[in-house]
Image (cartoon, coloured by chain):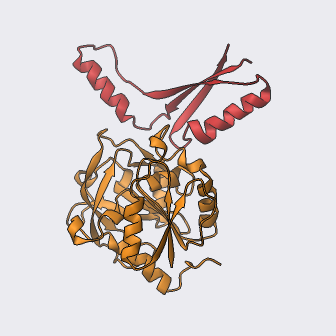
């Protein structure tokens, strides 16, 4: 446990990501052929005032209620110093 | 009857909604986002715009403003709530309506007249229209791509919750007439109970011929008609 939560938000499998599709098209137009698919997402860093289990539970709540839209997005939390 | 129009920081269609209600000859008041008082309004409109700069996701921050707590209670009590464009986004984010509004499939902001078909007129907000009516109404959004799980789209269909669909000028539901990639050409839906309605097109911007269309009046007239029929519009 530490005082920084790093949060990754990504679209669920199967949800179309028009931005990812457009970026991949740009990559192909640039002449690179090594990329077969792009998925875009969001990234947040939360500085925590404490590093106890209660803080972690709050981070989980915040992700569920605010940072991610559970209808279309999944999230993953990592903790680091 | 009294309309309440919520103003969030970044709302920009609140005055249009206000003017549309005034055009009906009804009383209307603005409701500030920081307030917790619905001021005795009988119907609440969440207007279009870019509440809180559309930060995070459209509607995601507005949902937590003090006035929304009251609006959610009002909706759960069965009173009518209409969300237009950003207001629709706020309604899905707050869980009053199912699904999500994602980035348009073509990634562009679209601002133009489109056509929508009224799918049913047994709702407070469509009572003055006929099922199958084709309304010419403008859209102005970048995040209007209605998404839900296939099973939930089927449930919306089965429960009669799809109120408006994008169509061509003759009422045909086609991929070409879909301006944003919405599943099943969905332009507007209601909750199971029917008292909460959200749509991406802007009826309040089409209430006088000089604006290019007055078809949006159908929705405002419907509210008035429903009241006359004694639907649950007066606050207990």
Above or below: residue A22 compared with residue B130: above
Q: Look at the image and tell me in which quarter the C terminus of chain B lies.
A: bottom right
Q: Quadrant of residue B167?
A: bottom left
B21 or B140: nearer the eye?
A: B21
Residue ranking furthest to the bottom? B229
The residue at 58%/31% (across/down) is A75
Q: Colour of chain A?
A: red
Spot occupied by residue B223 in the image (x, y as percentages of width and height): 44, 76
Chain letter for the orange colouring in the rendering: B
For this view, does B73 lie left or right of residue B91? right
Spot occupied by residue A39 in the image (x, y as percentages of width and height): 42, 27
Number of marks present in the image shown: 0
Q: Quadrant of residue A50?
A: top right
For this view, does A42 lie left or right of residue B184? right
Spot occupied by residue B39 in the image (x, y as percentages of width and height): 59, 69
The residue at 36%/32% (across/down) is A19
Spot occupied by residue A6 in the image (x, y as percentages of width and height): 60, 22
Above or below: residue B55 compared with residue B91: above
Residue B79 appears in view: yes
Residue B121 appears in view: no
Above or below: residue A46 compared with residue B128: above
The residue at 65%/36% (across/down) is A62
């Amino acid at each position: 446990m530490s005082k920084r939560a790093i949060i990754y938000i990504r679209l669920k499998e199967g949800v179309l990501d028009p931005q990812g599709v457009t970026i991949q098209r740009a990559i192909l137009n640039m002449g690179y052929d090594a990329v077969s698919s792009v998925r875009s997402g969001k990234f947040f860093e939360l500085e925590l005032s404490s590093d106890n289990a209660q803080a972690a539970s709050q981070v989980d709540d915040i992700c569920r209620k605010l940072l991610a839209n559970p209808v279309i997005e999944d999230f993953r939390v990592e903790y680091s110093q | 009857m009294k309309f309440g129009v919520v103003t969030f920081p970044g709302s920009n269609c609140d005055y249009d909604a206000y003017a549309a209600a005034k055009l009906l000859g009804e009383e209307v008041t603005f409701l500030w986002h920081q307030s917790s008082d619905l001021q005795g309004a009988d119907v609440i409109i969440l207007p279009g715009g870019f509440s809180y700069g559309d930060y995070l996701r459209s509607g995601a921050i507005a949902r937590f403003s003090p006035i929304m707590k009251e609006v959610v209670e009002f909706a759960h009590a069965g009173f009518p709530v209409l969300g237009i464009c950003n207001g629709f986004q706020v309604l899905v984010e707050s869980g009053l309506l199912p699904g999500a509004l994602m980035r348009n499939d073509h990634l562009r902001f679209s601002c133009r007249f489109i056509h929508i078909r009224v799918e049913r007129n047994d709702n407070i907000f469509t009572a003055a229209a006929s099922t199958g009516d084709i309304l010419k109404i403008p859209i102005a959004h970048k995040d209007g791509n209605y998404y839900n799980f296939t099973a939930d789209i089927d449930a919306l269909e089965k429960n009669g919750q799809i109120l408006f669909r994008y169509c061509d000028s003759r009422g045909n539901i086609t991929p070409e007439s879909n301006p944003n990639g919405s599943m099943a050409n969905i332009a507007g839906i209601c909750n199971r109970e029917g008292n909460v309605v959200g749509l991406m097109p802007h009826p309040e911007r089409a209430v006088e011929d000089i604006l290019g269309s007055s078809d949006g009046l159908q929705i405002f007239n419907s509210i008035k008609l429903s009241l006359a029929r004694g639907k649950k519009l007066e606050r207990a």
